[in-house]
Each structure stands twice: as structure tokens, then as C-alpha cells.
Amino acid sequence: MTLLLQDIRYALRMLRKSPGFTAVVVLTLALGIGLNTTVFTLANAVLFRGLPFDGADRIMAMRNGDPKQPRRNEGFSFAELAELRAQAKSLAGVAGYSVFTANVADGAKLPERLVGARMSANGFQLIGQRPIVGRDFSAEDERQGAPPVAIISHSAWTSRYGADPAVVGRVVRVNEVATTIVGVMAEDMKFPHNGDLWIPLQPRKGEEKRSSRPLETFARITDQTTPEHANAELAMLSEAYAKSYPDTNKNLRMRAETFAERDNGGEIRLLFLVLLGAVGFVLLIACANVANLMLARALSRVREMSIRSALGAGRGRILRQLLTECVMLSTLGGIAGLGIAWYGIRAFDAATANVGRPFWIQFAMDPAVFAYLAALCIGAGLLFGLVPSLQLARMDLNEALKESGRANSGSRRMHWFSGSLVVLQCAMALVLLMGAAVMMRSFLNMQQLRNGFDTEHIEIARIMLPETKYATPEARRQFERQLTGRLAAMPGVVSAAIASNAPLGGAMRRPYEIEGRPPAADAVVPDLTRVVVANAEYFPTLRAKPLAGRLYHEQDRDVVVINKSFAERHWKGENPLGKRLRFTGDNKGPWLTVIGVSPEILHTAGGREERNDIVYVPYAQDAIAAYGIILNTSVPPATLAEPMRREVQALDANLPLYNVMTFDEHLARIRWPYRVFGTLFAVFAAAALLLASIGLYGVMAYAVNQRRAEIGVRIALGAASADVLKLVLRRGVVQVGLGLLIGMPAAFALSQLITSILFRTSPGDPLTLAGIAVVLLLSGALACALPARRALRVDPMVALRYD
């Protein structure tokens, strides 16, 4: 410990003696370590930390689906929930829930739409949470016919009821059902899906059947078992259920996984792992830069190390001293990087505050982040310091002392290693530039989505009619006619329409068949198409005219309008008008006649290039309870939010209007992943390009300084300026070129890896690769230009006298 403290004190003295060198190294490392700490904090919150409950590693989300279709989750039936509770010995408890949305009205404030869950009575006990006001659910609350009760979230309690403890016992209307509030949960407790309201789980009509699977389930594994053992038992139970109930459980397998694996797997996990890799490249480039600086500094310290060796210091002692200096530098860089990390975390948190991320994802530094930061500081110090320190420790110090530090074979090895680091920097910069390019192209492609209509004059909102009050299709149709009539009559409104989903707001999926083309008998998964239920004003509101045939009218039944993609897929080269299709499933619907073909109106904007088949069904045919409102306006659409609410309240005082926004705001919500993550990749790529250019400049400047005598002799012997430029630039161009050759395959592999999260962007586009290569070459040329200019100014007499 005494020797270590001596090394630290000596290292600090040496760093104080070279403030310029220290500042450059610390700033370089601060950039690399700060960005890495930022991304690890984000990834830790999304992928690793999990639920904020005691024993969260033992709380498992349950899946029940076909292993051949890993993305598909069938859910659980009430019968399967009861069987798991009785038979799964590895599970200490199992609970079920079903997410729903609720219109909450109490007469005191405007009605509000809340996301909620029907929860098993033992649900909160399993996760170790209890209401802070009032009581938890009891088994009696789950009994059919029990008085309706609810528990609300802390945020709903404070925003709607002013944190009044007397809210317990208050009767409110939840989807038009009089319900008594019995408890309030703790702050930030919104399990399972950002919920603000919980009611007891009771089977509704038709849900008692084994074929009905409305439930998500979660469980706590026992202290004596592991997730692997629990999954082995679930696999055995799945096989037993498949044999006992082949009609409902064939090909279904149950599995337990953490909530982080369930909610943030697939593309989200891939994205954050790619970000970790990308920011790791930035740190490697920073370490390569510092390693080059350390190599240059090592040559200037040959005399110092020779004297220390002559005074009795062994090679191990010298090596430890040098590595201590390196770790001190990286520690200072880590401390400075904390500021970058703090700013980056706050910026990302603000950018994703209202995008529906799970409640348990909180972007904050915790002990795991600080442990990661400490490991980075130590690892980076050893990484950039080990080779220069070894090279210096291995030199023939006595010979070096005689030569007063002139270049020898050891310094030549250092020059070769320095050039190799520059090649590696260029290769990694190319990879990051490629990732940034495809992500930014995805963002630009998303920005250019205009969907064929003027978005500046569109206002949208959503509404949900409670089935208890609007139980029949005719009641819902009557409300729709009254609502659209009142909205269309508002000042500033050109037309009003309703649709199950607004453009770029998703679409329902339904199985279907074409008349005369029955599905194959052995088809495992039925063919699905996207379906949008809309009234007759939908197309006029979007100013969309039919490409063929006509659009449906308000009184039309048993007809559909298909879009161009659907027509080309099923009747390419034929006239689709008059063709028939029907929706299948548990209850086959009537045959529907195609009366028109609409233009392409995008309803999804996923990462993959998917077909955009859409079937438009008249609202008169399928009077759904939840739908969007679309207004075409002649005034700024944002000014119509409150008038819309007043019109809805005039029709039904207990009915809330929610997700009210302009269509441009709607587009901004869709674009946020490409904007945020594209910006992150751009920051990483810019940092990598800057660091690689600085590294190349440093190597070239040092090489020119080392070859001053040679350049002076060449100029004295009549070498032209072009020859001197070629001599200096050749090395830099060769290093950049080698970096491009090495980095091209890795850049192409990265673009292929992230293809699933790109939007209308082809991975590995040759033009993109060529453009990036040009950018890197120009940056390299610029980095070489200043040292080359300095070489032209070498005075032969001064250079020879210096040598």
C-alpha cells in the first residue's frame, strides 16, 4: 500500500508537470467513458434492472404460445390459471390479469380515460406491494356478484382527488358501473402496464371456456428453485395439458421469463446491444488515440526511465509506475465523463418521457452503473497504457541513455504499432458512420411520410363507448351519427369522420378468405389482413378519391373497399370489383362485395418492409365501440380540442375524449425512435470521426517531427514540394485505405444486423458505403494536411543542425 501511494503521488506530480498533455488525454477519455456510461445506464434500466420490487429476479412473466412462433402469445384461460396454482410446485404463487381501458367519471371533474387491469386478488401480494391508503383486494372481491371495487394509482389519487384520504369509500363510475374505491397504491406503482386503476379479476361472459384465453399471468418462483427448473416443470405440464386437452392446448408451451425479457426483448434488446457495441467502439478509438499519445510520450521519457533503471528500479517497478499514471489519467477522464453521462441521461429521459415506456424503467445511475464506470476507468487505463508501458520497459535503457533517446528498433516498433492503431480507428469509425447513416436515412424517410393528404389541417382523438351503456350495434350507430353531425357543424370544421384507427395509427388484423379460394386444410396460421372500420366520411375527410369503382355510403352494408395493395395481391391483372371475401375465425361473417379500390393510405409504419393490405369496412356493417375521430379543418386544428370535448360532453357527460392531438403531433410520436436513436448514432459517429481524425493528425505530426532531418536533406538535394507532400500524405492515405478495407465487411454486417429496426432503408446500400468512404478519406486528408504543410516549411539548415 505504501508503494502504491508513492506511485499515485508520483503519477500526480508527473501529470501536473504536463498540463497540456493531461488535459488532452482527460478530455479524450471523458468523451469515450461518458458516452459509454450514458448508454450503459440506459441499457441497464431497459434490459437488466427489472421490476423495482423486492426479489424481482424471482417474479416471472408467463408465456403460453407455439414455440414455432416465438412472437405469438396465446394467453391463459381461467382453467389454466387454476391448474397452475394447484400443480406447479416450483411456483410460490400465480396471478392473472387482463389489461383494459376505463372511462372514469365521478361528477366532480371531467370524465377521464385510464389504463387499468383486472387483477387477481393475490396479485399485489405476489409482488410485495400493498396500498398506502385503504385495503388490498380480498378473495371475496373475486366472487361473481360481489360489489364492484377498485384501487387507484398514486398519480390518479393526487391529480384527480388532491391526495384526499377520504377517497376511500367514494363511489365512481368505471365504464358506467358504480364502483367503490377501496385503496390507493404507492407512488410510481403502476404494475403491470402503466396502470392507474385496478379492479378484481372476474370471468366475463364466455371467458369461462378453456378455449378463451383473455389472461396474462405472472408468478413468483420459490426460493428453492431456479428459472430453469421452473421452465422444465412448465414444459412437463404443457405436454400433459396437450395430451389431456388436444383441442385447446395442442402445440402450446408455457414458459416463464423476466419482465425485462418479455417487454424489452427482440428488436428493443437488439437496438440497445448495438448501441452498447457502437459506444464501445467510440471508447476503443479514444483509447487508441491516448495510446498513440502515450507512445510519443514514452519516447520522450526514455532518458528518465534509463536513469531510474540505473538507480536500481526494476522493470516491474517501472511498469507499475507507468500503469499507475495511465489509470490515474483514465480515472480523471471518468470523473469528467460523469458530466457528459449526467447530461446524456437527462436528455434521453426527457426525449422518452411520454412514449409509453414501462413504469419500472427509470434512467438513473445506480450502484451497477458506478461499478461499470469504475471498471471502465481501470480497464481503459490498462488498455491504452499497457503496450506503451511494455515497450518502454523492454527497451535497452542503457543503450538508450547513451544515444540520448534517438530512435532505435524499439521506437520503430512503436511507430508500427502507432500506425496500426490509426488503421483500427478508421475501421471502427467506418462502422459507426455506416450505422449512423442508415439510422438517419430511416429518420429522413419517416420525416417524408405525408400519406397522400394535407396533415396540417387534421385533428384526431379517440373515444370508447362502454358496453354497459352502448350494448347494441344500433345504439353505437346512433351515437356515431349524432357525434359526427355535431362535430361537422362546429365552426372551422370542413368534415368529420370516425375510423377504428387513424392513418399511421395501426389497424386491426382479421383472418379472411376469398370466394372460390378456400384456405388450405393444413394451414397452421390463417391468412390475416389489416382491417379499418370507418364511416362513409372517412375518405372525403382525407380527400382520398377511389382508383376504381366507388366508395361506400352511410347506408351500405355487406360491402368493402380495398386498397391498391390488396387488389394487386389477390386480383393482379383482373378487375377486383364485384369480387367477394369474408372474415373467418370463430364465427364466419357474411360475404362482402368489393365495390371500390382506394389509394394507398398508410396505417402502419413498422421497421420492416411489409405489405400494406387494407380492407375498409363500413361502420354501419361493424359498429365497434372504440374508434378514432378525424377532423379536417379550415382553422389551426389544435384550437378545436376544447370544442370537441364540449360536443362529446353534450352527448354523454360521462364520456371522456382522449389522445386529442394534431396529426403532426401524431407523426412526431411515431417518429421518435428514429429521431432519438438516429441522433445517438450520429453523435457516436461524429465522435468517432473526430477522434479518428485527431489520431491520424497526431501520428502524422509526430512522424513529420521525427523525419525532420530526412525531409531537410531531401529539400536540400532539390526535392520538389509535390514530392515532399507525397512522402507525407502517402502514409496517411495508406492507413485510411487499410482502415476502409478492414471496416467495410464489419459496416455491412452491422447494417444487416439492424435491418429489422430500419424504415424503408436498404442495409448495405453501395451508395451509402461509398459516401461514407469518401467522408472518411476527406477527413483523413484534412488530418494529414497540416503536418504536410509543416513539412514544406522545414528549413534544411535548421533541421540538419538540430539533428
Image (tube, rainbow, N blue to C red):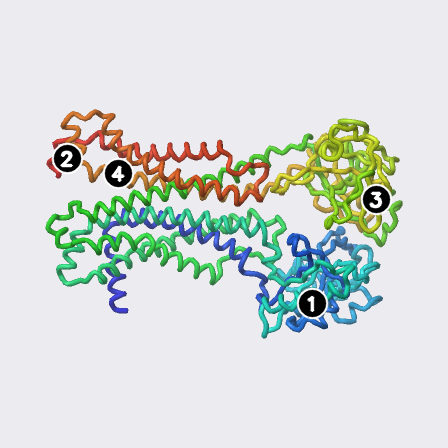
Label 2: few (<14), some or many (≥20) within 10 Å?
some
In the rendered view, would you say 26 is above or below 84?
Answer: above
Tell me, for residue 237, which label it has, or none. 1
Task: Look at label 3 and name its amino acid.
Answer: Ala
Counting residues from the start of the chain, the first of labels 2 and 3 encountered is: 3
Marks 3 and 2: in contact by CB < 8 Å? no
- Quadrant assignment, res 159: bottom right
- Quadrant assignment, res 319: bottom left
Residue 279 is situated, as x and y percent measured from the top left of the image, at 45, 48
Counting residues from the start of the chain, the first of labels 3 and 4 encountered is: 3
Q: Secondary structure at mark 2?
A: helix
Counting residues from the start of the chain, the first of labels 1 and 4 encountered is: 1
Residue bearing mark 2: 799
- Real-space CA distance between mark 1 and mark 4, rounded to the nearest whole angstrom: 70 Å
Q: Secondary structure at mark 4?
A: helix
Residue bearing mark 3: 623
Label 4: few (<14), some or many (≥20) within 10 Å?
many
Asked if residue 492 can be seen in this view, the reply is no
Counting residues from the start of the chain, the first of labels 4 and 2 encountered is: 4
Tell me what residue is drawn at x 64 percent, y 32 percent: 450
Residue 133 is situated, as x and y percent measured from the top left of the image, at 68, 67
Asked if residue 485 can be seen in this view, the reply is yes
Label 3: few (<14), some or many (≥20) within 10 Å?
many
Residue found at the far bottom of this picture: 224
Tell me, for residue 701, which label it has, or none. 4
- Real-space CA distance between mark 2 and mark 3, rounded to the nearest whole angstrom: 90 Å
Label 1: few (<14), some or many (≥20) within 10 Å?
some
Task: Look at label 4 and name its amino acid.
Answer: Ala
Q: Secondary structure at mark 3?
A: loop
